[in-house]
Amino acid sequence: MSVVVYKCPHCGASLTFDADRQRWECKFCLGTFDKQTLEAYLASQKETNPDLEKPEEPEQVSAEEYVHEQVDEEFNRNARAYRCPDCGAEIVTDATTAATFCVFCHNPTIIPARLSGEYRPSQVIPFKISKEAAQKAFLNWCKRKPLVPPDFKSKPQLEKITGMYVPFWLYDCSVSATLRANAQKIRRWRSGNYEHTETKYYELYRDGDMSFAGIPADGSSKMEDKTMDLLEPYDYSQMVHFDMSYLSGYLAEKYDVDKEGVWPRVKEKVANDAVAQLMTTAKGYDAVQVTHQEVRIKSRKAHYTLLPVWMLMYKHGDKKYLFAMNGQTGKVVGKLPISIKRAIAWFCGIAAAVFTILFIASGVYYL
């Protein structure tokens, strides 16, 4: 199985995608290239050297040859090893990794076979938030949290923030929805010494056809579904046709949960949204009680795409904490760990301050 490294037209070094400038840059000669320039260069290279279209497949090294024979059975079953085209080192990945880095020369590497056939996405949203911006957002997120462990905000920890293209299924659905409900309008007024209440009762019926486009659900079993949901929404107007060059410099995963596997989650989202749309027509009532609701799916179509996410995993004690950022909009979600030592010190400090204030106040009173 072959791997791909996008090369600089000027010096031949590896290129990475710059989210800030939406260009590909060379860290070696500092050259920058837009998509049109890069595509023109690649096309010219293929014309002068047709063999580039059929690269020789590098030797694949099995997990059994790469690791010690005592490694566990799961690793043997899922690990894959490839040779880096730049330095010849072996790159070890799991079965779902589609883009990664060489641990020796740090060159970004893409595994085309993981992105071909049924695993080739139709579209991608390129990163709009740079790593530096993601690190700054992380520090701002922690700024007013005095109880987090000191090493949680340390420079080595910040360097672990990783940009990843997460596989998503985007569903387009056409539905028909029905809603029945009881509703009341209540009017109160006062006359002399008496207070009057008038309640009018209504039976509501709503029925409508609706279309939904781009309902997302991540297709990776590694990602926490709730966290991925909280990163929404993405701006689909910035989605482009998939090109492997956008992956250069980032990690990427191929899906391991297919479109049928995520459909129950999508179906629930669509049903909730359809009922919510019908409920918007039940305004002007003081109370509404839904007695029956039904959503019928008339058609559905899934699109496989990659969406950008900045991620940082942190282990504190025996728990893991995840910081995640929408790589397009900058929306942040996650949980922060609490340092027990800092919490105790903070509590003692507050208690001492309160005791001092009470002591002074008591002294002034007796004076």
Image: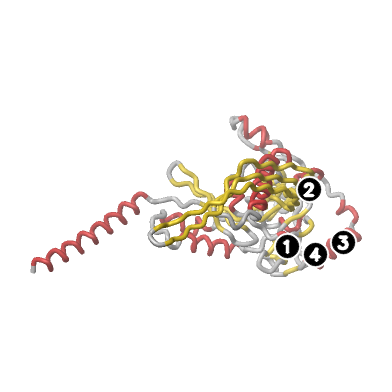
Circle 1 Cα neighbour tier, 10 Å, few/some/many (<14 / 14–19 / ≥20): few
Badge 2 element = loop
Between discs 1 and 4, the one toward the N terminus: 4
Q: Amino acid at mark 1?
A: Gln
Query: In terms of depth relative to the viewer, which is nearer, 210 or 144?
Result: 210
Please name the colour scheme applied to the rendered image. Answer: secondary structure
Q: Nearer the viewer, mark 2 or mark 3?
A: 2
Query: Could you tell me how many numbered marks the image carries?
Result: 4
Q: Nearer the viewer, mark 3 or mark 1?
A: 1
Residue 267, given in percent of the width and then of the height, sits at 69, 43
Circle 2 Cα neighbour tier, 10 Å, few/some/many (<14 / 14–19 / ≥20): some
Q: Residue furthest left?
A: 367
Q: Amino acid at mark 4?
A: Leu
Residue linked to disc 3: 43
Between discs 2 and 3, the one toward the N terminus: 3
Residue 58, given in percent of the width and then of the height, sits at 78, 44
Circle 3 Cα neighbour tier, 10 Å, few/some/many (<14 / 14–19 / ≥20): few
How far is the residue under mark 1 from the one under mark 4? 20 Å
How far is the residue under mark 1 from the one under mark 2? 19 Å
User: Left or right of 344: which side holds 12?
Assistant: right
Residue linked to disc 4: 38
User: Left or right of 185: which side holds 180?
Assistant: right
Residue linked to disc 1: 238
Question: Can residue 1 be seen?
Answer: no
Q: Nearer the viewer, mark 2 or mark 4?
A: 2
Between discs 1 and 2, the one toward the N terminus: 2
Residue 33, given in percent of the width and then of the height, sits at 75, 68
How far is the residue under mark 3 from the one under mark 1? 25 Å
| Image vertical order of residue 118 relative to residue 240, above or below | above
Residue 120 numbered mark, or none? 2
How far is the residue under mark 2 from the one under mark 4? 21 Å
